[in-house]
Image: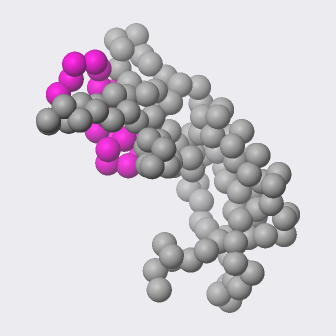
Amino acid sequence: MSKAFVNEDTSQDLGTGRLPVRPAEPQPITPRGLAELREELEGLDGSSRRAHVIERILETVEVREPELDGDGEAGFGCAVHVERVGGRRRSYELVGPDEADPRAGRISIAAPLGEALEGRRAGDV
């Protein structure tokens, strides 16, 4: 079974007890994303696997404020509005990998779509 389909909160640990490997460099997170993770952690049993995963995430993130450079280029934490062919519109917020939630319109800056949107300005095609 793919790891993508493993529930982090199950008491069955599949044998290893290891937490997911984190990147060596701190990952960016918005102040809101940090607050949401802390709130989720408060609501968990401290011995649950998910609690340990969140604690590990909190140790390896760096809070970054939203960035919109002087030329109006979208950066980390910015909302980007996209109009697709046919006029369908969608808004995305460029966030760190640990707070990405595509259904809520939060796209990781490390994802292909996030990379494509970062640095764009109003009117870009």
Q: 90 above or below 122?
A: below
Which quadrant of the structure image shows residue 122? top left
Q: Residue at x 71, y 57 (%)?
A: 54
User: Image check: 46 left or right of 84?
Assistant: right
Q: Position of residue 17 (x, y in %)?
A: 71, 80
The residue at the far front in this view is: 87
Q: Position of residue 105 (x, y in %)?
A: 44, 41
User: Image check: 52 left or right of 65?
Assistant: right
Which quadrant of the structure image shows residue 69? top left
Q: Residue at x 38, y 49 (%)?
A: 111
Q: Position of residue 58 (x, y in %)?
A: 71, 49
Q: Position of residue 24 (x, y in %)?
A: 58, 54
Judging depth in this view, the residue of 35 and 25 nearest the camera is: 35
Task: Tell whether position 111 is magenta.
Answer: yes
The residue at the far top in this view is: 70
The prevailing secondary structure element of the residues shown in magenta is loop
User: Image check: 112 left or right of 22?
Assistant: left
Classify the position of the C terminus by image quarter: top left
Judging depth in this view, the residue of 117 and 11 nearest the camera is: 11
Would residue 59 be visible to someone looking at this image? no
The residue at the far right in this view is: 46
Would residue 95 be visible to someone looking at this image? yes
Q: Residue at x 82, y 51 (%)?
A: 42
User: What are the residue bounds of the magenta stretch?
Assistant: 108-125
